[in-house]
């Protein structure tokens, strides 16, 4: 994340939790019954925050890395935003960097100089599940609460 990141977060309050509690059953129904998704209880989440960057990189090594320097290198281009790649003189690793130049197509003009922070690298979610007990069928449990959130 050579240019840092910005965080965007929804203020999760009782109104949001109530909205989730009111609509969660219909969301599961739509995804499972209408769309035919094999969705287990607890797999549906509400995204309440993201971290976005202009560029990112990740590297991994299958064995102990010998002494050396791992570099996340910037590649400047005559037109358009820079791209990045990994360089490790000793080899034995694998790295990915993004976004690829092809992913910028149509997002910016050739004269744009400010990088676009549209690469989502972290997501924060509000996790919930529909109670399995029929008598509690309309209660949704939030993972951040000990008690069920009512309708």
Image (cartoon, rainbow, N blue to C red):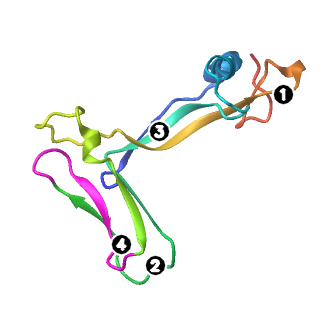
Whether 96 is drawn above or below 27: the answer is: below
Return the x and y of residue 11 as percentages of the image width and height: 54, 29
Task: For mark 3, give the secondary structure.
Answer: strand
Per the rendering, the mark at residue 50 is 3
Residue carrying label 4 = 70
Task: For mark 2, give the secondary structure.
Answer: loop
Badge 2 or badge 1: first in the primary sequence: 2
Return the x and y of residue 131 as percentages of the image width and height: 81, 27
Which residue, as the protein is rendered here, is positioned at the far front? 36
- Give the residue at x 14% y 52%: 77
Q: Quadrant of residue 6?
A: top left
Residue carrying label 1 = 132
Q: CA distance from mark 1 to mark 4?
A: 50 Å
Q: CA distance from mark 1 to mark 3?
A: 30 Å
Badge 3 or badge 2: first in the primary sequence: 3
Q: Is 42 situated left or right of 136 in this image?
A: left
Task: For mark 1, give the secondary structure.
Answer: loop
Residue carrying label 2 = 65
Give the extent of the magenta segment.
77-91
Mark 1–mark 4 contact, CB under 8 Å?
no
Badge 1 or badge 4: first in the primary sequence: 4
* Nearer the observer, 84 or 6: 84
Per the rendering, the mark at residue 114 is none
Mark 2–mark 4 contact, CB under 8 Å?
yes
Q: Quadrant of the N terminus?
A: bottom left
């Amino acid at each position: 994340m050579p240019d840092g990141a910005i965080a965007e977060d929804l203020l999760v309050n009782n109104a949001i939790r109530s909205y989730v509690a009111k609509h969660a059953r219909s969301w599961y129904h739509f995804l499972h019954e209408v769309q035919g998704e094999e969705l287990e209880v607890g797999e549906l989440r509400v995204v309440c925050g993201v971290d976005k960057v202009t560029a990112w990189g990740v590297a991994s090594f299958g064995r102990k890395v010998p002494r050396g320097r791992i570099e996340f290198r910037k590649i400047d281009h005559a037109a358009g935003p820079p791209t990045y790649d990994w360089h490790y003189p000793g080899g034995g690793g694998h790295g990915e960097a993004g976004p690829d130049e092809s992913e910028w197509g149509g997002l910016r003009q050739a004269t744009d100089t400010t990088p676009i922070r549209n690469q989502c690298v972290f997501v924060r979610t509000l996790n919930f599940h529909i109670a399995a007990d029929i008598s509690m069928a309309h209660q949704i449990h939030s993972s951040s609460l000990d008690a069920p959130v009512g309708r």
